[in-house]
């Protein structure tokens, strides 16, 4: 029995640990977008489904000796895929479909090892039920989720801050090789063993009918609903409430914890008590989502949606545990649970970006949960049915209210692989009317419509900001200028352009380029020649010859999905190759939750360059608070009055390691 438990724990730990390891390796190739993680999750759910289907077919169709032989052969073959380091030819050139490219990369690099890890829990539980008749194999499912939770918490706290990414992949590969030996040993010890006559698994379950199609559909629906709510709540709290790095760990921890509790013991899911709590939680979440006055109440929103997710997942997973079949049919049960998880991930990760103009999957998920609750209590006490009906009405009403409120000041939405963009129009008078480009809670540019303000730089780019001071210093010294900007936004910096200047904006999101050209006029009004190459800025700069830039503005660090590959020592070295002698690189590091100023100072020192930090409070109608770190070898430029007079001292952190392509530590830079 300890061998079964150890093998299942090791497989689940490796299964969950590999997800952030591989995602972190490929994030820089696709612009650091949060959608990369969503796509990876879709792949992992699909591979998990394939693994559970394999276990179901093998257990039902093959005798135990052939099961053992087949599985051990596949385990040995999977070692050929190691180590799990993606080949560089998977890097996009800018024109490919990132979704298809990521799925292909994961399939080739990781497919067979991940598939076999996915088969371990249901396959070994079936072997366990055969060998230890009368024992409860479903507790091993709770153990596997405990291992997944351990991996989830170990990665950001104990692995990522200390171990370089490539080393993580190599260590995981070594761990997988050890798991392979452990699994082969378990299979070998179990080969040919049947339970004693009269108490075989088949005999014990002889009078248990196979699950009906309706029961299997219910299993799938419960799993899909919890998966949809996990992903949509994660998106909501990280995009619409607070762009805090690593906040996504909280919903996933809640999700796994409910699986552990519900499958460990039926006593941990007191159904009669939980049902009215579930109804109340769905109603409160729907109300909090719809009421715009509550949108920026950080503590309230986090409490409502984290507690609400816990309660609803306890209902979904508690009902799954209550409806689990006899061990004879456990592989089919896990197959349906996995299918539900994959369907939920696909609905949020693939269907929603194509079918919904904004993040409306959360209100729809709440409605689905309310309908499922009503179905499950249809035969219970009348009060439960009444509560479920009221909850459904509230959820539908609040979903409609949420959509109406969303479009109240929104004149345009655009959604694609990289997220949801909104163009909002505000202001009642001609002088105050303006448009803003928003993604979640992050503002990416603002333009006033009045003629006297339309060409004036606003928000983080005013003349008192770090970038504004640099441009005002450079223009009298050198004209024309060649300026590169990583991150287009509304194209505000083009307002500084003069005849003969070249402003080259790099952006990975085609929707941003389209909006900046159609819904804002900074690019069209600029006196400079404006270029907008599409694709990840670093990959584009790696392919291009020297751009001979006088200034490069790196403006991509204001959200939760920090594109780390743009703020490493190697990235700065690449930027320097595209600069003219005496040029300057400006990092926009305005961020409510991360202190990136020492990070830029560290990579500047690693490249033998000087860094100056300019903080601007931005206390008028046109300006927002901003932080810019200016990096250059041109000490005369950094010492010019417009720059030096506004410089703030940078607090040194000699204990911090320099960020590289292979190492970064977000915990160190979290604002206290």
Image (cartoon, rainbow, N blue to C red):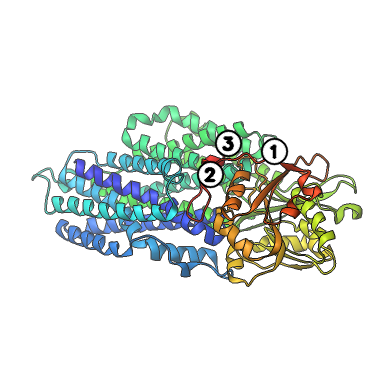
Q: Secondary structure at mark 2?
A: helix
Q: How much space separates mark 1 and mark 2, taking CA atoms?
A: 31 Å
Is residue 67 shown above or below 591?
Answer: below
Counting residues from the start of the chain, the first of labels 2 and 3 encountered is 3
> Residue 492: x and y, percent?
77, 56
Q: Which residue is mark 3?
A: 285
Residue 415, by quadrant, is bottom right
Q: Residue at x 73, y 51 (%)?
A: 638
Residue 471, by quadrant, is bottom right
Q: Quadrant of the N terminus?
A: top left
Q: Which residue is mark 2?
A: 666
On residue 292, which mark appears? 1
> Residue 94: x and y, percent?
58, 68
Counting residues from the start of the chain, the first of labels 1 and 2 encountered is 1
Counting residues from the start of the chain, the first of labels 1 and 3 encountered is 3
Is residue 494 shown above or below 308?
Answer: below
User: Of 519 and 315, which appears nearest the observer?
Assistant: 519
Marks 2/3 in contact by CB < 8 Å: the verdict is no
Q: Residue at x 37, y 54 (%)?
A: 48
Whether residue 153 sits left or right of residue 7 in the image: it is right
> Residue 601: x and y, percent?
61, 48
Residue 354 seen in the figure: no
On residue 488, which mark appears? none
User: Quick one: label 3, few (<14), some, or many (20+) residues within 10 Å?
Assistant: many
Q: Secondary structure at mark 1?
A: helix
Marks 1/2 in contact by CB < 8 Å: the verdict is no
> Residue 500: x and y, percent?
82, 69
Q: Secondary structure at mark 3?
A: helix
User: Quick one: label 1, few (<14), some, or many (20+) residues within 10 Å?
Assistant: some
């Amino acid at each position: 029995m300890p061998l079964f438990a150890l093998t299942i724990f090791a497989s689940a730990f490796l299964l969950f640990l590999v997800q952030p390891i591989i995602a972190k390796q490929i994030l820089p190739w696709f612009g650091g977008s949060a959608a990369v993680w969503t796509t990876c999750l879709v792949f992992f759910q699909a591979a998990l489904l394939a693994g559970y289907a394999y276990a179901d077919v093998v257990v039902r169709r093959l005798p135990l000796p052939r099961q053992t032989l087949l599985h051990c052969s596949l385990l040995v073959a999977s070692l050929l895929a190691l180590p799990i380091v993606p080949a560089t030819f998977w890097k996009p050139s800018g024109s490919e479909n990132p979704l298809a490219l990521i799925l292909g990369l994961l399939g080739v690099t990781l497919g067979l090892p991940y598939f076999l890890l996915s088969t371990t829990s249901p396959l070994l539980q079936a072997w366990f039920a055969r060998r230890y008749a009368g024992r409860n194999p479903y507790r091993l499912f709770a153990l596997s989720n405990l291992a997944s939770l351990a991996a989830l918490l170990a990665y950001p706290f104990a692995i990522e801050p200390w171990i370089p990414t490539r080393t993580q992949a190599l260590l995981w590969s070594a761990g997988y090789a050890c798991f392979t030996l452990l699994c082969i040993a378990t299979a070998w010890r179990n080969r040919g063993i049947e339970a004693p006559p009269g108490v075989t698994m088949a005999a014990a379950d002889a009078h248990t009918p196979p699950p009906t199609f309706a029961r299997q559909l219910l299993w799938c629906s419960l799993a899909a609903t919890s998966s949809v709510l996990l992903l949509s709540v994660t998106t909501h709290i990280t995009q619409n409430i607070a762009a805090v790095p690593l906040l996504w760990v909280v919903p996933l921890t809640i999700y796994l914890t409910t699986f552990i509790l519900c499958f460990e013991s039926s006593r941990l899911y007191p159904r009669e008590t939980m049902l009215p709590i579930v109804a109340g939680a769905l109603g409160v979440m729907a109300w909090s989502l719809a009421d715009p006055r509550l949108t920026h109440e950080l503590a309230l929103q986090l409490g409502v949606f984290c507690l609400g997710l816990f309660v609803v997942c306890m209902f979904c997973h508690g009902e799954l545990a209550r409806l689990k079949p006899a061990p004879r049919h456990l592989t089919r049960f896990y197959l349906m649970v996995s299918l539900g998880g994959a369907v939920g991930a696909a609905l949020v990760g693939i269907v929603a970006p194509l079918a919904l103009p904004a993040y409306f999957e959360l209100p729809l998920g709440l409605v689905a949960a309310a309908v499922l609750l009503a179905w499950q209590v249809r035969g219970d006490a009348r009060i439960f049915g009444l509560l479920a009906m009221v909850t459904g009405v509230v959820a539908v009403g609040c979903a409609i209210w949420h959509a109406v409120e969303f479009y109240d000041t929104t004149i345009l939405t655009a959604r694609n692989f990289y997220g949801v963009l909104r163009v909002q129009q505000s202001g009642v008078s001609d002088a105050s009317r303006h448009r803003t480009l928003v993604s979640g809670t992050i503002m990416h540019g603002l333009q006033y419509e009045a003629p006297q303000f339309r060409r004036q730089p606003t928000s983080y780019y005013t003349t008192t900001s770090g970038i504004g001071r640099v441009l005002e210093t450079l223009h009298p010294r050198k004209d024309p200028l060649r300026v590169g900007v990583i991150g287009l936004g509304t194209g505000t910096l083009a307002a500084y352009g003069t005849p003969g200047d070249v402003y080259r904006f790099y952006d990975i999101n085609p929707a941003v380029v389209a909006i900046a050209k159609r819904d804002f006029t900074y690019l069209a009004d600029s006196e400079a020649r404006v270029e907008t190459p599409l694709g990840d800025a670093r990959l584009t700069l790696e392919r291009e010859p020297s751009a001979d830039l006088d200034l490069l503005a790196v403006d991509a660090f204001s959200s939760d999905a920090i594109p780390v590959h743009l703020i490493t020592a190697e990235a700065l070295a690449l930027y320097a190759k595209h600069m003219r002698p005496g040029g300057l690189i400006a990092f926009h590091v305005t961020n409510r939750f991360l202190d990136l100023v020492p990070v830029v100072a560290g990579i500047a020192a690693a490249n033998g360059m000087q860094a100056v930090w300019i903080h601007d409070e931005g206390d008028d109608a046109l300006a927002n608070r901003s932080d810019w770190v200016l990096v250059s070898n041109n000490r005369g430029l950094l010492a010019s009055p417009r720059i030096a007079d506004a410089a703030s001292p940078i607090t040194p952190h000699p204990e911090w390691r320099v960020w590289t392509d292979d190492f970064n530590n977000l915990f160190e830079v979290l604002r206290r």
